[in-house]
């Protein structure tokens, strides 16, 4: 009887462990073949990187934008707010602003290299300029916010693993998901499909959504 | 079945710990993951997805969410709800809004659990479930049996309603929303089920309820303090809680915040008395009050349902009786005294009329129904002077009265037995009480719940003409008035009046005496002292058309009437 009870307990323990270890059966990925591979589209001329990057004559006016080639959005965004929000939200900057140059739906995907394109992003990938509807970005996520919020993990100590084996990285939230200590689009998404999980259509997320692991890496719910 | 050795078990445990720590060390199996709000296929409850593995998605989405709640991923109900209402509520609950409305997107049972804004197709739930199955999780759209939500709880409400905490003190676990409104989320944290029922804090001893509700007298109430448990017989008095003592159930002894049987005031049961009698049946409380109501003469609580109203006037207009008309369950306790703890914290009517709260004497309580209330039945005994208002009958300015509202008139009452004297004050319940209670020498519950002797008398009191006198026939009178003195003391009253009529003629005491009193508005000291007020079915006018008694001197008087065919015109003693 005693042993049986012990085994039941163990089984429960392992159910928990297994849930978290749920395998992500997707091979190590590259941008080729990903949602950001535009080479099959007419305007790309078979190129992948060109919509965002150019080796020469790139836009150097954008901070943190290496060899930038895409036309920037001039949209003013409605900012996320909620009664319980403790972070300070401001107009997007950093790498989020680069993502929004396509994903706010105001600039054509093929507007790059000084030409104005006509191919707008699909409605499914268009998050618009009303960022009230999206998870907040561009805010500092540190130990102080963790304390103020009350249901977040401390980004300086909480360890996470991103990517799909064998292409994984393990480190703190701050090291692997924050940029200048801030949450940006890149906190959840890996634009180049390097450290992602799931196939095409799964949103280039860095952590599996099985068991909402991506959310629960930060949200201590 | 292979047995696992302790060494193997230890290895498993260590491996488990290692896995746990490797995954980031967070208690990921607590919180939402281990709660019924994990609707993913990994959820622990019976209501969960057929195959969906994501958890948060059933409520939240990271992009293209609705503004109805943080990153909200559900359709907000648009239907109409029946809100909570009661005559004592000051915060009229309207249609739910804010956080409450988004909770209802699952919990009103109208929207499929798997209907998510981010999905083109409805996410399938296990077992073919679509909307919330019926049960405690499905509140429906009739919220009149649920604690009100989306009500503005401000200091004005606290002062007009009373018995509420100042909302400025709500800085702990129980919070109002940003608009100062009470919402589902004031009591429930949908992400944390560690307290059970997703409560924001444990509700043992109703600690959660008491954060807002500050009931008068509650601190000394037996319903707060009693450690009594259920003996297992009869109905489970606490079917909706896991607490096992009266004190631990506290408010929930009688109330429940959702799916209440008695909608107004959120009582467990629709029938008012049922809320009390599951416990007051000898199964939790030691005395079996419930059985008292099987007797022939009772306070008939089962006669009405829904007539009692906590906001009713002190002088009851719509006649009824419920346990809570005579007992304040927030105040009642076991202290003794002239006004026992069972009658603590009640409203009543003073002898001069009006309202007194709390009452200071038992009769003030009885006067709520037995004095100025309309629709009282005719007296059991037809009297020469008819009075159904006991407040007028017991007034101390009357020519005579039993000393309930104050000591008697000060005349000689030789029949009184110790400890009673002419300065004594008695209670209604000295006469009207359980025939098997302590007053009658029994072990039953005290109080006028039920008696074998009508009208709810502690002892027998026969009133029919030609009743053979015995110690039991008028046992109620003989409780205080010595039978021997009444008949054998040698005075003219004893010999010529009492023994002749009661023993000889077999006339009941009530033929001549009206036990309550004769109002000064109707009688006078000459004709109506000594509680003289004829039973007109026995005492008839004499040959001169007269029917009266006249007091002459102390211990003497004369009668004008016809009784048992004997014409008194007059007869003196």
Image (tube, rainbow, N blue to C red):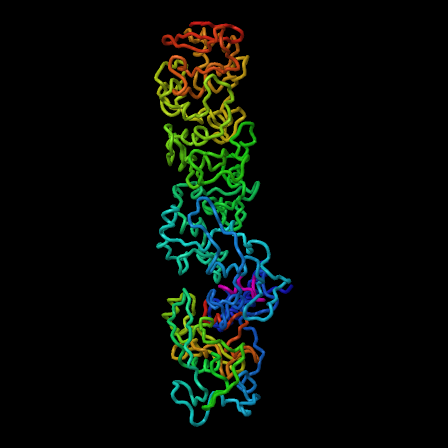
Query: Which residue corresponds to the image point at 52% horizontal and 89% vertical from the top-left?
Result: A48
Residue B454's place in the image compared with A186, above or below, is above
Q: Is residue A97 magenta?
A: no
Q: Which residues are magenta?
A: B30-44
| Res A221 visible | no
Q: Position of residue B385 (x, y in %)?
A: 45, 18
Confirm whether residue B347 shows in the render: yes
Of residue B310 and residue A160, the one placed in the foreground of this image is B310
Q: How many numbered dots are placed on residues in this image?
A: 0
Measured along the vertical axis of the image, is residue A82 above or below residue A170? above
* Residue A102 on image: x %, y %: 48, 82
Q: Farthest residue toward the bottom? A: A56
Q: In terms of secondary structure, what is the magenta stretch mainly? A: loop
- Whether residue B226 sits left or right of residue A19 in the image: it is left
Q: Quadrant of the N terminus of chain A?
A: bottom right
> B43 or B354: which is nearer to us?
B354
Q: In front here: A146 or B8?
A: A146
In percent of width and height, residue B151 lies at: 43, 54
Q: For residue B31: magenta?
A: yes
**In the picture shown, does residue B59 fall above or below A28?**
above
Q: Residue at x 50, y 23 (%)?
A: B379
Query: How far across and how far down the image is residue B498, in percent?
Result: 46, 10
The residue that appears at 54% across and 43% down in the rendered structure is B270
Is residue A200 placed above or below B18 in the rendered structure? below
């Amino acid at each position: 009887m005693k042993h049986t009870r012990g085994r039941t307990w163990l089984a429960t323990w392992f159910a928990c462990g297994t849930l978290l270890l749920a395998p992500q059966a997707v091979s190590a990925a590259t941008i080729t073949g990903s949602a950001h591979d535009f080479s099959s589209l007419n305007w790309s001329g078979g190129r992948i990187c060109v919509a965002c990057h150019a080796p020469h004559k790139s836009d150097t006016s954008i901070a943190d934008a290496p060899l930038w080639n895409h036309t920037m959005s001039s949209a003013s965004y409605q900012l996320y707010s909620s009664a319980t929000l403790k972070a300070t939200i401001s107009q997007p900057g950093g790498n989020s602003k680069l993502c929004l140059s396509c994903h706010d739906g105001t600039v054509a995907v093929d507007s790059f290299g000084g030409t104005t394109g006509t191919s707008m992003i699909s409605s499914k990938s268009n998050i618009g300029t009303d960022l009230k509807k999206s998870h907040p970005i561009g805010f500092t996520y540190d130990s102080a916010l963790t304390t103020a919020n009350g249901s977040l993990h401390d980004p300086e100590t909480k360890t996470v693993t991103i990517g799909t084996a064998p292409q994984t990285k393990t480190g703190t939230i701050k090291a692997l998901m924050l940029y200048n200590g801030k949450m940006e689009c890149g906190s959840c998404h890996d634009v180049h499909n390097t450290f992602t999980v799931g196939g095409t259509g799964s949103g280039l997320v860095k952590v599996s959504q099985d068991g909402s692991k991506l959310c629960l890496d930060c949200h201590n719910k | 079945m292979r047995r696992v050795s302790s060494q193997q078990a230890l290895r498993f445990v260590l491996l488990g710990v290692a896995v746990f720590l490797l995954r980031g060390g967070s208690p990921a199996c607590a919180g939402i993951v281990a709660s019924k709000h994990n609707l993913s296929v990994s959820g622990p409850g019976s209501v969960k997805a057929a195959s969906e593995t994501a958890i948060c998605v059933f409520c939240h989405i990271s992009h293209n969410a609705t503004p109805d709640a943080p990153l909200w991923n559900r359709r907000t109900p648009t239907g109409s709800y029946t809100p909570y209402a009661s005559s004592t509520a000051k915060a009229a609950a309207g249609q739910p809004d804010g956080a409450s409305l988004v909770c209802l997107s699952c919990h009103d049972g109208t929207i499929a659990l798997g209907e998510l804004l981010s999905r083109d197709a409805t996410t399938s739930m296990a077992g073919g479930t679509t909307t919330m199955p019926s049960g405690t999780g499905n509140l429906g759209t009739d919220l009149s049996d649920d604690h009100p939500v989306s009500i503005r709880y401000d200091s004005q409400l606290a002062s007009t309603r009373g018995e509420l905490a100042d909302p400025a003190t709500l800085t702990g676990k129980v919070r109002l929303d940003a608009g100062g409104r009470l919402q589902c989320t004031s009591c429930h944290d949908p992400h944390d089920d560690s307290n059970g029922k997703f409560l924001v804090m444990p509700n043992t001893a109703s600690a959660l309820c008491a954060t807002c509700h500050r009931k008068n007298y509650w601190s000394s109430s037996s319903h707060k303090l009693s450690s009594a448990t259920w003996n297992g017989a009869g109905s489970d008095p606490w079917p909706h809680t896991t607490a096992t003592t009266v004190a631990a159930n506290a408010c929930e002894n009688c109330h429940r915040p959702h799916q209440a049987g008695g909608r107004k005031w959120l009582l467990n049961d629709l029938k008012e008395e049922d809320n009390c009698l599951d416990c007051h049946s000898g199964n939790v409380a030691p005395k079996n009050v419930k059985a008292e109501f099987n007797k022939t003469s009772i306070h008939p609580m089962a006669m009405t349902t829904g007539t009692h109203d906590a906001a009713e006037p002190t002088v009851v207009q719509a006649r009824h009786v419920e346990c809570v008309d005579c007992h304040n369950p927030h105040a009642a306790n076991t202290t003794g005294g002239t006004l026992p703890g069972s009658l603590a914290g009640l409203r009543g009517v003073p002898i001069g009329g009006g309202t007194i709260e709390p009452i200071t004497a038992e009769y003030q309580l009885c006067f709520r129904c037995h004095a100025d209330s309309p629709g009282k039945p005719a007296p059991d005994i037809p009297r020469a002077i008819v009075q159904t208002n006991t407040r007028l009958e017991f007034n101390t300015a009357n020519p005579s009265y039993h000393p309930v509202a104050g000591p008697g008139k000060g005349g000689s009452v030789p029949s009184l037995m110790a400890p009673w004297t002419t300065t004594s004050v008695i209670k209604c319940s000295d006469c009207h009480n359980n025939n098997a209670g302590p007053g009658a020498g029994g072990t039953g519950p005290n109080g006028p719940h039920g008696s074998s002797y009508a009208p709810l008398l502690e002892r027998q009191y026969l009133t029919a003409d030609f009743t053979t006198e015995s110690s039991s026939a008028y046992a109620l009178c003989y409780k205080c008035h010595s039978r021997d003195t009444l008949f054998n003391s040698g005075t003219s009253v004893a010999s010529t009046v009492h023994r002749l009529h009661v023993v000889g003629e077999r006339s009941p005491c009530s033929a001549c005496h009206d036990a309550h009193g004769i109002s000064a508005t109707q009688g006078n000291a000459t004709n109506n002292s000594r509680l003289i007020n004829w039973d007109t079915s026995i005492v008839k006018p004499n040959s001169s058309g007269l029917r009266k008694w006249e007091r002459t001197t102390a211990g003497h008087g004369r009668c004008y009437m016809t009784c048992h065919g004997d014409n008194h015109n007059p007869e003196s003693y």
